[in-house]
Image (cartoon, rainbow, N blue to C red):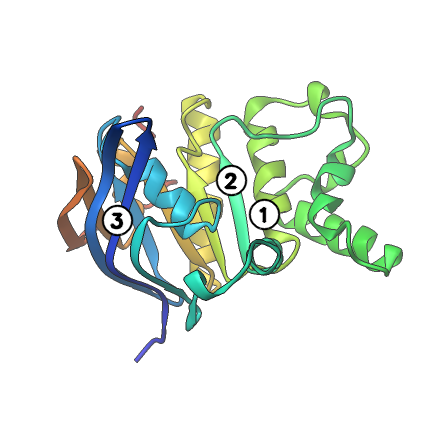
Amino acid sequence: MSQALIELKNLKKTYVSGDLETPVLKDVNFEIKKGEFVAIMGPSGSGKSTLMHILGLLERPTDGTYRFAGKDINTLNDEQLAHMRNQEIGFVFQAFNLLARTSVIDNVKLPLIYSQDKKHMERRAKKVLESVGLGHRLSYFTNQISGGEKQRVAIARALVNEPAVIFADEPTGNLDSKSGVQVMEILQSLNKEGKTIILVTHETFTAEHAQRIIRVHDGNIVGDEIVTKQRIASDGVFLK
C-alpha cells in the first residue's frame, strides 16, 4: 500500500483583518499518497488556492494538523519550511512566473542556486529541458518563446530538484488548446514515472486528466472521488 505523502486533519485557515475574521478553510481532512495524480477542483473563492498554498508550504494553517512526508509542519520554523519547499516541492503556475530577459536554461537552474556543483546545475537543467522537448531552446530568452513553451520551461524548473510532489495551479489557463494538450500530456507522463501531481483547477475537463478529484466549496471538502474514465490528453480536443 502506498505511503501517505500528505495528511490533513481538521485543517482550518482564517484570515483576520482588525475585528473581521474570514474563515477560508473549515475542518479539511484528506490524505494524498505517493504517486497519485489528484485534482483539487472548485469555483473561484472556494478556498482551493489557499489550500494549495498551505499544501505547498507557502502559508501556514490557522489550526489543525498538516503532515508532509511524515513531518508535522507546525513544528518547523520558516527556514526549515523554506528548505523543504526548495527540495521537496515543485510549482507550476498559470502565469509561468519566469524571469524576464533571462535565458531558458538560467530560469530552470534557479532552484539549484544553493548547489555548489555548477557543472551539475548545467547538466541537470539541460536534462529536464530535453525531457519536456525544449533541448533546442536552452539559450533563448523567455520573451522569445511561446506561451506553451513557457509553461514547459516552468515544468522543467519544477522538476530540476527532483521534488517529491509537483503542484500545478491552473497550468493550462493561459494556453491555447494545442499547448494545453502538451502540458497535460507532460503531467500525465510524469505521473506514470511515479511523480505525485496535485493539479488545482476550476475546469472539469482538466480535472478529469487526474486519477482522483477532491472538490472544494466554501472552504469545505464536498467530494472526493476516483476518476473512473481518466482522460488522456492526446485523445481528443482540449476544451477550455
SS class of the residue under badge 1? helix
Q: Is residue 40 above or below residue 193?
A: above
- In percent of width and height, residue 186 lies at 49, 46
Q: CA distance from mark 1 to mark 3?
A: 27 Å
In-front residue for pair 132/77: 77
Q: Of the residues shown, which amino acid type is indicated by label 3? A: Lys
Mark 1–mark 2 contact, CB under 8 Å?
A: yes
In-front residue for pair 105/12: 12
| Residue 33 location, quadrant | bottom left
Q: Check the picture and name the quadrant holding the N terminus.
A: bottom left
Q: Of the residues shown, which amino acid type is indicated by label 2? A: Val
Q: CA distance from mark 1 to mark 2?
A: 7 Å
Q: Can you identify the residue that label 1 sits on?
A: 158
Eye-nearest disc, 1 or 3: 3
Eye-nearest disc, 3 or 2: 3
Q: Can you identify the residue that label 3 sits on?
A: 12
Dot 1 or dot 3, earlier in sequence: 3
**In the drawing, does residue 214 fall left or right of residue 180?**
left
Tag 1: Cα neighbours inside 10 Å, few (<14), some, or many (≥20)? many
In-front residue for pair 232/110: 110
Instruction: Give the residue displayed 76% in from the left and 40% down from the top.
Output: 105
Instruction: Give the residue displayed 16% in from the left and 44% down from the top.
Output: 220
Dot 3 or dot 2, earlier in sequence: 3
Residue 92's tag is 2
- In percent of width and height, residue 31 lies at 27, 63
Instruction: Give the residue displayed 77% in from the left and 49% down from the top.
Output: 113
- In percent of width and height, residue 75 lies at 46, 66
Q: CA distance from mark 3 to mark 2?
A: 24 Å
Instruction: Give the residue displayed 55% in from the left and 60% down from the top.
Output: 88
